[in-house]
Amino acid sequence: MMHATRAVLANNDTGPDFAQVASASDEVSRLVMRALTCVNRDEAIAIDLMKKASILLRPHMEIGSRGRNTSGGLAPWQVKRLKQYIDEQLAGSISLNDLAQLVKLSTSYFSAAFKVSFGTSPHNYIVSRRVDHAKNRMANSNASLSEIALDCGLADQAHLSRIFRRATGTTPSAWRRYSALPDKVATF
């Protein structure tokens, strides 16, 4: 596995650094070996260990397929068009049907292909873009939260607060106060 990883990384300058992949690979190997040794004694523990190994591998699964369409996903032109459309339409309503028509797919196939390409559902992606837009507006303007909510395509300030808190773990007003501090230690 290490030789294949080196070959992939040598051909891909934008991938994770080799030390990260090697460390994850070593840990995955240890977890798999432990799972194999205890599979006959306690299958539940073996399954748990394999799940942990799978989680460690997840960020590195697509190292070799960057720039190529993954099976069942969207074409690069579709991804680009969707990102642009969603960012342009954040202030308004964005329907699943409109997104599917934009890339010339049926709604049901579009939903599955979107999730393969973006790693999340269309709804969750749009919500995360709205939260990012709200953060940008809060950091770069003195606009009220209700104005920012409307600018992000949300019904009102309460709606903004609900989705913002769900996404970041804090309220918009607390995030705004914290981001305004001159010597903040970490960001949300």
Image (cartoon, rainbow, N blue to C red):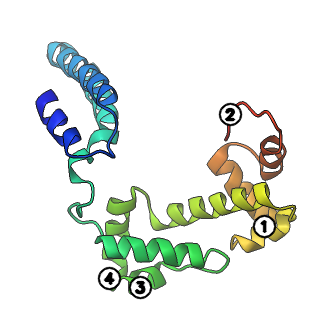
Q: How many other residues sit within 10 Å of disc 1, few (<14), some (14-19) or many (≥20)?
A: many
- The span from disc 1 to disc 3 (Cα, nearest Å) is 27 Å
Q: Is residue 95 left or right of residue 101?
A: right
- The span from disc 3 to disc 2 (Cα, nearest Å) is 38 Å
- The span from disc 3 to disc 4 (Cα, nearest Å) is 8 Å
- Percent position of residue 20, x then y: 34, 28
Task: Classify mark 1: helix, strand or loop.
Answer: helix
- Percent position of residue 164, x then y: 69, 54
- The span from disc 2 to disc 4 (Cα, nearest Å) is 41 Å
Q: How many other residues sit within 10 Å of disc 4, few (<14), some (14-19) or many (≥20)?
A: some
Q: Which of marks 2 and 4 is nearer the N terminus?
A: 4
Residue position for label 1:
148
- Along the viewing direction, whichever of 53 and 187 lies nearer the viewer: 187
Q: Which amino acid does label 1 sit on?
A: Ile
Residue position for label 3:
102
Task: Classify mark 4: helix, strand or loop.
Answer: loop
Q: What residue type is labelled 4?
A: Leu
- Along the viewing direction, whichever of 116 and 78 lies nearer the viewer: 78
